[in-house]
Amino acid sequence: MNLTFATNFISYKKPISMITSTSKKLLGLLKEVDGEKSVDEPLCLHTSFRVGGKADIFFSPINEVSLITAVKIANKMDVPIFILGNGSNLLIRDGGIHGLVITLKKLKGEIESKKMGRNIFLLTFPAGILMPQLVRYTINMSLRGLESLIGVPGTLGGALKMNAGAHGSEIGDVVHSVKMVNMKGEARKFNKNEIRFYYRGAEFLEEGIFLKATLKLEKINKDDLLQKVKMLLKKRNSHQPSQSGAGSIFKNPTGHYAGQLIDLAGLKGFAIGDAVVSTKHANFILNRGNAKAKDIEGLIRHIQKKVMDKTGISLEPEIVFAGEPE
């Protein structure tokens, strides 16, 4: 199976006619697999941009067994699989996604804790847990290591794939090991030294779907930790918009901040349809209510061109594009 990765998803293109002709058969085979299934699910309901077409088949497994079974069935039928996290770093095009879309948000999993030394703990979280929930859990436990990611949206799986970071730290800094399912339906574990984390990305020895991750965190004084979190949240809220949109649209080029470059190009407040560049932070695009994915993508391309014309610097998107044009 030919695969490409980004933000905890797996997808590949295939002629639409070949995909749709197998949808009914795939749905029939998934009938006995535990989890929720739907046909022609509107993906705009599952992304923070609130845009995107439909999924041929949408599946929410409730445990590892049902996930593995679904992967094996799709693999045997040669149907593409798309793993959807919280949809917060993602632009799904208006034509939707063909094949099988799997969301891990209902995948059950316990949080496990193990003490490694006087102040060092290993905590294991399911990949579908939302990052704000995960970070607040570690803060309540007085554990340092993830507090800088307090405002990062999305799931743990998405954060791992893009090596989410903020305020000079990244999730890769605290990863101890990761468990995933490969496309043969086999569970695999990778230790930190088998993973290459880099700016807004990560490479694994094998492609697959994240199941859980174990993070190495340090116990510190809770009051000190809460004080730092309060400062970080105040800074984030004063600089970033809260309306409907994704996270940062572009990666920061070396030696520059993407938002400053976009502002320099005079694009704050510039809009295509209901997609608009935030006036609070230019590296954010907002949906004012009725934007289409094509409006947002068009605005992204316009920003890239204007910044290149003005500064000679190429902006690389941080968000992921998926699906087919309308």
Image (spheres, rainbow, N blue to C red):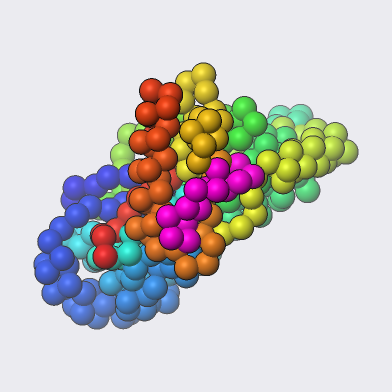
User: Foreground residue, 116 or 129?
Assistant: 129
Coordinates of residue 119 in the picture (x, y in percent): 75, 31
The reply to whether residue 103 is visible in this rendering is no
Say whether residue 256 is left or right of residue 145: left
Tell me the quadrant of the picture where the C terminus can be found. Answer: bottom left
Relative vertical location of residue 163 with respect to residue 41 in this rendering, above or below:
above
The reply to whether residue 54 is visible in this rendering is yes
Say whether residue 147 is left or right of residue 175: right
Q: Residue at x 24, y 47 (%)?
A: 3
Coordinates of residue 100 in the picture (x, y in percent): 29, 66
Q: Which residue is drawn at 61% across and 30% down?
A: 169
Relative vertical location of residue 294 with respect to residue 208 in this rendering, above or below:
below
User: Foreground residue, 317 or 39?
Assistant: 317
Coordinates of residue 71 in the picture (x, y in percent): 29, 61
Q: Residue furthest right?
A: 223
Relative vertical location of residue 306 with respect to residue 101 in this rendering, above or below:
above
User: Foreground residue, 271 or 101?
Assistant: 271
Q: Residue at x 61, y 58 (%)?
A: 243
User: Foreground residue, 190 or 320?
Assistant: 320
Q: Residue furthest top?
A: 255
Q: Which residues are the magenta region?
A: 268-281
